[in-house]
Amino acid sequence: MNGWILLPVFLPVIAGIFLLLMSQCERRRLHQAAGAVLVISAVLAVAAAWTGDKSVTLFYLMKDIPVYFHIDGISRLFVTFTSIVWVCVGIYAFVYMEHEGGEKRFFGLYLIVYGVIVALDFAGNLVTMYIFYELMTLTSAPLVLHNGSREAVMAALKYLFYSLCGAYMGLFGIYFLYQNCDTLAFTPGGTLNPVLAQDHRTILLIAVFAMLAGFGAKAGMLPLHSWLPAAHPVAPSPASAVFSGIVVKAGVLAAIRTVYYVVGSDFIRGTWVQTAWMVLALVTVFMGSMLAYREPVFKKRLAYSTVSQISYILFGLSLLTPMGITGALLHTVFHAFIKSALFLTAGVFIFECGKTRVSELTGIGKRMPKTVWCYTFASLALIGIPPACGFVSKWYLAEGALNADVGVFGWLGPVVLLLSALLTAGYLLPVTMKGFFPGKRDGEKTSAGNSEMKSSAVDIRDAQKKEPSMMMLIPLGILASLTIILGVLPNPLIDYISQLISGLM
Amino acid sequence: MSANMMVVVVLLPIIFGVLVPLIPFKTRRHMTWYVEGIVLLTSLLVWALLISRPDGSFTLFRFTGNLSVSFRLDGLGTVFAGILSSLWPLATLYSFEYMKHEGHEKYFFMFYVITYGVTLGIALAEDILTMYFFYEMLSLVTLPLIMHTLTREAILASRTYLYYSLGGAAFAFIGMIFILTYGTTSVFVPGGVIDAAALGDRQGLMLLIYVLCFCGFSVKAAMFPFSSWLPKAGVAPTPVTALLHAVAVVKAGAFTVIRVTYYSFGTELLRGTWAQMVVLGLTIFTIVYGCSRALKETHLKRRLAWSTVSNLSYILFGAALMTPLGLVGALSHMVFHAVMKICSFFCAGAVIYKTGRNYIHELRGFGWKMPKVFTIFTISGMALMGVPGLCGFISKWNLAKAAVSSENPLGYLGLAALLVSALLTAIYMMTISIRAFFPGKDFDYDTISDVEDPNWMMILPLVIFVIAMFVFGLHPEPVIAALESIAAAMN
């Protein structure tokens, strides 16, 4: 009986619903309960993932469509990094959510979304994946509108509608694949029926493109990217962290499943679909970095950075070569740790100092050096400076592009990646540099007479050294050190991935 | 159960309905018992019929030659009669509470009960004349229900309804004449009755007549350009809009379209012709048009009415694909949409009944004051937009399956329209829920302190519908298998 692998799905979902329905309770009790459920489910999820390939059919939705879960290499990878990030961010949130309020609702939904994502990672066929993909959208939307302000509600609606738009585009493709595939169960190499596929080639290509563009909405790919910069600044920081680190990865997972496990990479190799996908990804990489570079609000800057970085992954996938996928999967894992660490730092700045704009962070390094060091490590990793982990994934991506048979994109891709890396340095590092080296206080003389302005502009520099509490610092430290450790010792992961993708081509 | 029971279930509500205003009830409670009793009895008899499935037909009377009023229960009729007989008692229960504030209850219940019999007549009709007869009657007996409040708006709405319905019936009549002339028989036969030899080279004419007939019958199903009567008719009391304008009357339109398409003209004659292209085009356009209008609408019931316009065209689209799979898709949406839409209408009715608010912008913060109603409303909204696990996903899946396998470019286009419509549905339903549950930080709940959930008579039907949505959404196989067996008879 493999039914127990669904425990990490049901346990957090049921516990979460229970939390939502329960009447108000003491904070400590709430934290204990939520924390216990979170850790137990994460342990169960990882245990389920790493004890071999297992499958379980829950029930039949329609007579030829089972709700079917199957754990394979990809599930293992996704569940593992999801669980690590989810637990770290969850612990951090116990402190952070104090100033946001509504903790019961937040942790209830936080648990539910975790369960749904585990189910999404474990899904064994396209319809099951779609079910949990859509459920994830619906259950995660309330996390965005947590503070209930008008802005947050609008952002949540935007997120909801963009994601649904993407999901329906995906569904459009699923309908066609259902008719033209031997089975919708994920099979390395694809299940497209060659005879039927030959007859319906044009419409199938359109359908696959609709799926890639649709799932790209979740992953922040052009043209459906703009929910990301809207949703992140208004969501509580822990929510932003898991959104950027994990939820957007659902789009990546869906694209991997579609291309490599159902359609088969051979079907789209060399077609206009591959070209269009690559173009969209590259344009997004560049545009996301550019927008991030120009953005003054810190969390929004990080959101644009996510837009750009996820498209690195999509670009790697669009190459349809083992090297490209390796780079993409590595970047998926690394980016999850990096970006959640970055958002957690942004959360610390908001929580401790109430600062949301980059320009207000001058001198922050004096106030909380450890936090800023964590931020710096994660930034270096994202830029791709060795030995931090981003270097490894970007190396594979560039190498993959150069070796792939994709014409002009073979060199254009690496160039765009490099440009974007420069921009990444340009938008991330100023926080560190200004943070540790605030320089002369410009306008000191003019503001001397204006005490109000002085207090708002200068207080960070004059403040005593004060780190956030350990509950916040430790999860942040873990995530930040993972970005370095994985950069120094990437080989186990690379070996695992190369073994994983050997059957895909 | 013998076949003459069919005439009983049709006539029982009609006759006892007429008696409602004549009987001197001592109290209101007696009247409600009487009405619920008739409706329940009829439903029980219908269920007995559906289970025993008598094979014969029953002729009530005969005009001349082969023109008769006769009944017969076949698969398609089973579906429609099943929907009606399940929903009518629940809707009646709901209206006892709701109609307290509307007045003229006796006349209301008279027509409400009569309509039950008439729609059953459509479901059980054996031949096209009987169906046409009850179809016309349906227009007439539902007219007073729309007019019920006797406001100027209501009278104008009922006038529009009458003109549209009569106009549609006229076109349908032309179709009927041609079927009687060129058909081998007047009764409904799976696969059609048109005699190719008698038709000769008049096939083009027949296609034109089909388009006219399709449009005529789809007036009741509110297909574009005949859709504007439906939102206007939203002035009627909510039990009417919910049961008749989301289920009985409009689905009678869809039902008659399916009858003439699959059982009279026959898909063999129509598939791949320009006539099919025209009707497909109209339904696809209506799918998007209805949703767009719903999005623009700020009046709660009218928004739901436009949503009905769009959803009915899902059914018509499935029917117009003219494949067995299309029929399965159409019928499954017919069943599931009935549950979803009546549920959302009842929620709207509960809001109107308890608070008198009619516009969506007035609903801020209601989610916390009427938690049961708005939770159920949200679930029904999710079902309408096709969230997996609820029944809307299943019927869309079936429609999509039919559209893809039809290999018809317009089918593909229709599939795209279905998904665009799903997105628009999400927008116009979810904005209501979000507004109700998240009114904004500074919202003052004292302004809506009078708002509360209604009593059990209104909540019970809602709960039953929600359960049905989940059951159909998670375990649709029995229903789908039954529908597939109906469609299998087509080939």
Image (cartoon, coloured by chain):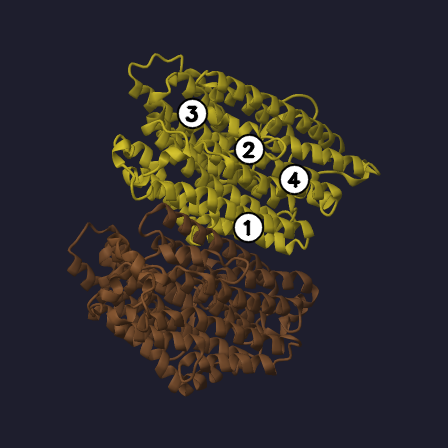
Q: Is residue B101 left or right of residue B174?
A: left
Q: On residue B419, which mark appears?
A: 1
Callout 3: SS = loop
Callout 1: SS = helix
Q: Read off the residue under disc 3.
A: B237
State the hue of chain A.
Answer: brown
Looking at the image, which residue is at 68% across and 69% down?
A: A195
The chain letter for the residue carrying disc 3 is B
Evaluate if marks 3 and 2 touch, with contact meaning CB atoms under 8 Å apart: no
Marks 4/1 same chain? yes
Which chain does yellow denote in the image?
B
Residue type of the residue flagged with mark 3: Pro
Pointer 3 or 1: first along the chain: 3
Please provide percent x and percent y for residue B134.
57, 26
Please provide percent x and percent y for residue B316.
60, 41
Mark 3–mark 2 Cα distance, whole angstroms, equals 20 Å
Q: On residue A8, which mark appears?
A: none
Pointer 4 or 1: first along the chain: 4
Residue B247 visible at all? no
Label 3 vs label 1, nearer the camera: 1
Based on the displayed image, in which of its 4 quarters is residue A281 positioned?
Answer: bottom right
Q: Residues within 10 Å of mark 2 (few under 14, many from 20)?
A: many
Q: Read off the residue under disc 2.
A: B252
Mark 3–mark 1 Cα distance, whole angstroms, equals 32 Å
Residue type of the residue flagged with mark 1: Leu
Evaluate if marks 2 and 4 touch, with contact meaning CB atoms under 8 Å apart: no
Residue type of the residue flagged with mark 4: Leu
Q: On residue B282, which mark appears?
A: 4
The chain letter for the residue carrying disc 1 is B
